[in-house]
Structures are given as structure tokens and as C-alpha cells.
Amino acid sequence: MPRLTKKVRQQLLNQNSGFERRTNYESRNFEEERTYRIENGYLKIRAVGSTSWSDSRYDRTWVGDDQEIHSFLYKYLEELDYDENLE
């Protein structure tokens, strides 16, 4: 497993454009679905969900920060295409 330095993370993002994963989370008063997609060297995250409040529906999209990118790549590294000689 390569060490996920900033340079390696960027190489992985560049090599895996189009990779997408969805996650779901539900609790008593909260539910959320997130879609993570690698596009053009960026990790784009979309969160759609609701809470128990009456006007609580939301739909947000943002570009992942360093911590979100690191966590995502670490979790899904086995599913990604990468060269064993990443630097």
C-alpha cells in the first residue's frame, strides 16, 4: 500500500477520474446519502439528507479538502486503479 502523501493522493485522483461511491447513514432523527466522485483530479462530494426539523432537507455539493480526500482514498484504495510505483 502506498503512503498517501499529497503528491500520491493527487496522482490517484488523476488516474481514477470517473470513480464513484455512494454511502448512506440513518439514525433516529437524521438521514443522509453522500455521493463521492473523482472528476478532473478533484474529489467532488454531494450530500443529500434531512433531519427531524420541518424545513431540514438539504442538498449540498463541494470539493473535498485534504482530510476528506485522504480518508476517501485510504478507505477505497483497494478498488482504485494505481501503479505500485507511486511516488
Image (spheres, rainbow, N blue to C red):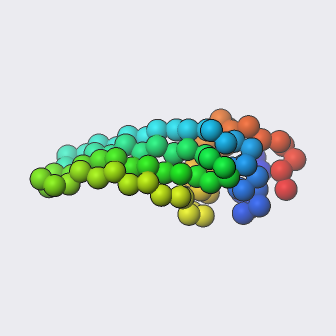
Residue at 71% x, 56% y: name it: 9
Task: Answer whether residue 36 is visible to the viewer in this image.
Answer: yes
In this rendering, would 69 be left or right of 52? right
Residue at 72% x, 63% y: name it: 6
Residue 17 in the image: state x and y as whole percent: 67, 42
Q: Is residue 22 above or below residue 50?
A: above
Q: Specify the farthest residue to the right.
A: 85
Q: Is residue 13 above or below residue 22?
A: below
Residue 64 in the image: state x and y as whole percent: 54, 58
Q: Is residue 56 above or below residue 38?
A: below
Foreground: 2 or 57? 57
Residue at 44% x, 49% y: name it: 46
Foreground: 86 or 13? 13
In this rendering, would 20 be left or right of 22? right
Foreground: 65 or 87? 65
Residue 87 in the image: state x and y as whole percent: 85, 56
Foreground: 47 or 78? 47
In this rendering, would 71 be left or right of 24? right
